[in-house]
Image (tube, rainbow, N blue to C red):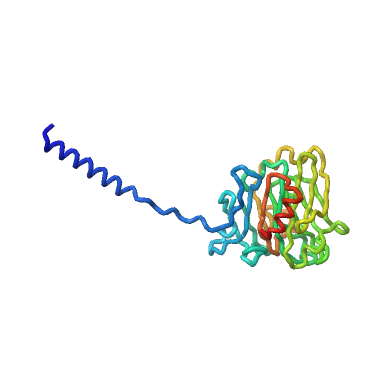
Amino acid sequence: MNTFSKILKNASFILVFFIAASGCKKTTQPALGDYPKDANPPGGPLKFYVAFDGTSTNPLMNAVDSTRANFPATNTGAVADGISGKSYKGSETAIAKYAGVNDFGKSTSFTIAFWIKKTPQASGKGTNFAFSMDKKDYSWTNTKLFLEFEDWSTTSVGNCKLYIMDQWTEYINGNGMPNVLNGNWHHLAFTYNGTNSTLVAYIDGTMFRTNTLSTPSPLKDGFGDYDDFVIGGLSDYTHSKNTWMNNWDGSIDQFRLYGTALTAAEVSALYASKL
């Protein structure tokens, strides 16, 4: 090959390289949103966390689960002041519905922790559901997990029931939750240890009541499959089959699901942090 041919070949190579390199421009990734994140390693105990701190005009952004950037299928709740930052403000027609809550459904033990601000449901209007894990045609309730407050609650006593896989734990009358529906922010937490079937309820970081569910544990195989998880109410088909079930008309903030039963000290720390 003569000198001219070599020069021409090298020049061609340089030109091709320059064109290829200039075509590989760095692009800017769209922002996912500025939402709080808990320190939690992949596969860690915190399975789902919604702070409701978004101020976006997109309601889905305001209800994103920040453990895995898990966006709701729908969020029709309003934005209100929270215990920290902003919160979810419910109504008779509003819900934040998720296709799933990551791998929380596999949990054989769990903790559910969140803040509420609410006054009693109007008499004769049935119940207010804080959350539900819905499964069509599962028992008569069409749900596998929920917490609901009864319409005969008062500002001094919150009468409510926690339902886990067709087992009911009642906090009513003399065992009702004191002052949680007085229009101020209160922290609720429920821990369930599947090893000994022990359920513990906490109010504002303090242990309130301990109950034992049936043995073997109703969660020996986890929750199994379900259709959706709703904060602030239930799925439409559940509500339509049981018209006394109503959506949450108060506020909810800092909603967490853990795949383990937190200790009393850990629950107390969540309350004290106001997060």
- Please state which of residues 65 and 1 is positioned toward the viewer in this rendering: 1
- Please state which of residues 109 and 228 is positioned toward the viewer in this rendering: 109
Residue 51 in view of the camera:
yes
- Please state which of residues 224 and 267 is positioned toward the viewer in this rendering: 267
From the viewer's perspective, is residue 273 above or below residue 220? below
Residue 60 occupies quadrant: bottom right
Residue 235 occupies quadrant: bottom right
Quarter of the image where the C terminus is located? bottom right
x then y, percent, for residue 135: 68, 47
- Please state which of residues 202 and 79 is positioned toward the viewer in this rendering: 202
From the viewer's perspective, is residue 235 above or below residue 212? below
Residue at image location 44% in from the left, 53% down from the top: 29
Quarter of the image where the N terminus is located? top left
Which residue occupies the extreme right position in the image? 174
Residue at image location 72% in from the left, 64% down from the top: 185
x then y, percent, for residue 70: 57, 51
Could you tell whether 270 is left or right of 173 in the image?
A: left
